Image (spheres, coloured by chain):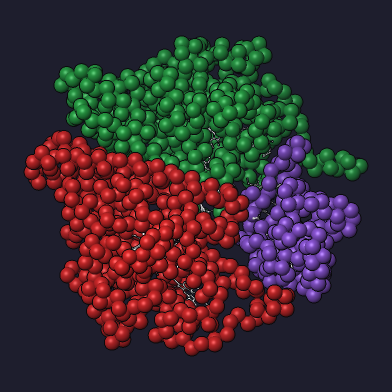
Chain colours: A red, B green, C purple
Amino acid sequence: VSIFERKQEAREPYFRVAEITDTTVDPSVWGRNFPYQYDAYRRTVDQIRTRFGGSEALPRTPSGADPRSIVAQSRLEEDPRLRAMWAGYAFAVDFREERGHAYMLLDQTFTERQRAAAQPGTCLHCHASIYVAYRTAGGGDLIKGFEVINPLPYAEARKLVQHPVTCIDCHDPATMRLRVTRPGFIEGMRVLMASRGERNFDVNARATRQEMRAFVCGQCHVEYYFKGPEKRLVYPWANGLRVEQILAYYDSVGHRDWVHAKSGANVLKAQHPEFEMWNQGVHAQAGVACADCHMPYVRVGALKVSDHHVRSPLLNLARACQTCHPVSEGELQARAVRIQDNTYRLRNRAMEALVALIGDLEAARGAGRSDAELATARGLQRRAQFYLDFIEAENSMGFHAPQEAARILGEAMDYARQGQVALRDRAFRPNLP
Amino acid sequence: VSIFERKQEAREPYFRVAEITDTTVDPSVWGRNFPYQYDAYRRTVDQIRTRFGGSEALPRTPSGADPRSIVAQSRLEEDPRLRAMWAGYAFAVDFREERGHAYMLLDQTFTERQRAAAQPGTCLHCHASIYVAYRTAGGGDLIKGFEVINPLPYAEARKLVQHPVTCIDCHDPATMRLRVTRPGFIEGMRVLMASRGERNFDVNARATRQEMRAFVCGQCHVEYYFKGPEKRLVYPWANGLRVEQILAYYDSVGHRDWVHAKSGANVLKAQHPEFEMWNQGVHAQAGVACADCHMPYVRVGALKVSDHHVRSPLLNLARACQTCHPVSEGELQARAVRIQDNTYRLRNRAMEALVALIGDLEAARGAGRSDAELATARGLQRRAQFYLDFIEAENSMGFHAPQEAARILGEAMDYARQGQVALRDRAFRPNLP
Amino acid sequence: MAGEGAVACLGPWGYVGAVRLPEPLRRYGLGAALGLALGAGTFTFVYGKGISYLTNDPAACANCHVMKSQYDGWLTGGHHGAATCNDCHTPHDVIGKYTTKALNGFWHSFYFTTGTFQEPIRMKARNRAVTERRCRECHTAMVAALVGDGTGNEFSCVRCHHTVGHGR
Ligand SMILES: [Ca+2]
Ligand SMILES: [Ca+2]
């Protein structure tokens, strides 16, 4: 590249060679206008492992039911205690390390969890470019389309989409400005802000640009559940984003994800609460958004573009961190890994406590003790397990909010061990939050 | 004036009007050469409270035994559960919020802990300008003097000193360079470095200037115990600075501070491990020293000097934090307090767990259960209590190392609750580190 | 700085110091790359207004867009009326000044043209030492009491004042 081109580029960032509208799903069409972003976007197929993140590319023999020739490593094999924690739920059958965005639709379609239980159309909310499909199904109305697609059987809904998350899910095609397109997030933010005294919050109208750099990710990287027979996707934020506020919400609506196969407790599965945990950390407090670390600016000639190769920042420390932290990559790596190692050790302690409680409950049940006798301990299992899973399911191994992650794991141990006491002492009164 | 002299002048902005030597204890003499530092040093008499730090000036009626007309607030009254934790130990009689350096000798001399138990000369190591006294008592040999003064009865040793910590304790009078003068720290660093493979570590010879800006504080703001009948002051760092490494050391030498009055357990008191905890935080990892926050630079006319008014940085946010963190004071305050509030809530949960275990042990003992039956639970009390006290006694309410503080409190709960299980189930095998 | 992938660097005034070889030189070999480097570097130095290095006008530094954020930061920063880029980034003495300018000018042009520099751009040890000295030269009086222990065991100003030049 010669210097002439560089000067040139600074003045002429891109050409609109293709027309894109609010129904253009295919990213390759957008890519004709924005080749740098598109090229990077396609690189989310890369699989590189970090100590706790990224992913490993494991070859497998494709079968009729699952044609994938490469999958990410199984987390169940890495830590078999997870099977005890999720006994009786589809997650105990298949749960893998997540990988790049390119795989989201494939991995959802072919996970064994699909065969272990019948899944609804709701699943696609976060695994496909479904914005246009919602609008079409709703006759132009996003929310209506959402309500139409949610209760469909997965296989049927699956026919309505073709791509993993694409440009249109995060961008307004006319201005390229960020926007959120996901009903779950739009409604979740509305109840959250209502709990803070703001009624009828409209996230697309109200969010700042910097907030949007986190909100587009918060569309999917959040805890959720399917509400009622209509299988509506709901983000459980009516009381706030902290783990105890979310659990209080589930308790208040009497929700359980399943009945634990060993203990008989009404338990919950936490799922990727990155957005919620990030919110509790000092980075969020300082206004640092997901995109700052996961899509840092990269220079292409004279232009600065956002790296659309969304991935682990630990594979990209210079750009992801050094803009703000003027220290060496080795030092940054060390700081992150220290936080993660601390979290990991504590997670393992908490896992021991939980598995011990589950074992005790199983034994007590086997010994024929009544549901009434087991109620307190089961309640404590529900709580301990949700807290532990909140960190287990969060994908940064504590990095997004180090103190909060340790706090939650600490409390998880407190509840699990109290459950063990309760099983041995009917007079015991637990100390809840 | 020749150009040479000009350079000299610029390098030495002070007039050496008074001669100071390695026996000049009186800070007012040093103050004639270094008036800015001396004036600030004297302001450590100020008492202002922050949410968790600083101190409150409470008036009291002086008595013959205790002539102080103002003391800091009692921590025992703020949280009576502390009396249960320390039952049978002098700390359950009197324990107050610490205040400025100006009070250290006074507060030590007149604390009721002096009357609750006979204290040795060792105490003075950290509450008086004792460097010259050690050298004198040792005939010029610092360590020898230390060994002479340690076993003296407190009242006798007390006569050998007059000042709280002064200039000579941290500075070389000839060059004004920082130095450490405390045998406890010198020996502590030696065993610590030996555990990392470095033999015969001489801290004064080896430390960088930046390290010294923390080491001078680490002379006193550390966990310690009195070893053997010679009452030698020992910093328990032979395995490292983390709480479990310190406890492992105490276990290996069979040390206990006292036998718990309610439970009969062999327990330990943790004391102000600021240096140890700071070491686990991201600030230390980034090379930020105690003096950076507690003695930030301050402008006096055309000069800038280190603020010798050592105090809570939350009373001085602009200088203590803003140079490194270019955000508003309100925002900095919010970040610190959020960390502290999180720690405080977790500390309270851990306190509940510990007090519950102590209650159970007391009841079991009252019911006549044998020492053998109580052994496991008592061991767990020792561990839980030391962990909790490590954070309780650390004076930053988690700020110095937020994640580590939460980690330790979390483990404290795990051990305390396991103790409760053990009391109810003789077959129970605890999960230790 | 010397070590693997480093060579002694001859500036216009003789031996200057060891310079870490950039990636392309290490990859393609010194001899072949040097010709290319000189050609490309000189070309950019002229066309890309590398000559800016020889002036004191901060706007000249911003001739390279990769210096723009620093320029913008400097415009609104505390040193705007007090120090130019070169005041902080080149030594005070004449020889040192032009050696630094020539070295920086050459390498920056080279990197800029080949596009091989790592981003975000980080100040390297040699330039850091220059800047640290410059702080002390202007602020002698202010910091005399702090750095005057004569041990050479001085600590970094930028450790705390990392935002002074152009923010971060
Ligand atoms: Ca992953
Ligand atoms: Ca205090």
Nearer to us in this view, B275 or B75 = B275
Nearer to us in this view, C37 or B207 = C37
User: Compared with residue A205, is residue A332 higher up or lower down, i.e. above or below?
Assistant: above
Residue at left offset 49%, top offset 48%: A337
Which quadrant would the N terminus of chain B be assigned to in this image? top right
Residue at left offset 62%, top offset 61%: C120
The percent position of residue A365, horizontal first and vertical second, equals 12, 42
The percent position of residue B19, horizontal first and vertical second, equals 75, 26
Q: Looking at the image, how many numbered discs can be counted on the residues? A: 0
User: Compared with residue A194, is residue A140 higher up or lower down, i.e. above or below?
Assistant: below
User: Compared with residue A364, is residue C77 higher up or lower down, i.e. above or below?
Assistant: below
Q: Quadrant of residue B50?
A: top left
The percent position of residue A15, horizontal first and vertical second, equals 57, 85
Q: Quadrant of residue A73?
A: bottom left
Q: Is residue A335 left or right of residue B201?
A: left
Residue at left offset 20%, top offset 27%: B426
Residue at left offset 40%, top offset 45%: A344
Q: Is residue A142 left or right of residue C161?
A: left
The percent position of residue A433, horizontal first and vertical second, equals 26, 47
Which quadrant would the C terminus of chain B be assigned to in this image? top left
Q: Is residue C70 left or right of residue B348?
A: right
From this viewpoint, is residue C66 visible? yes
From this viewpoint, is residue A248 visible? no
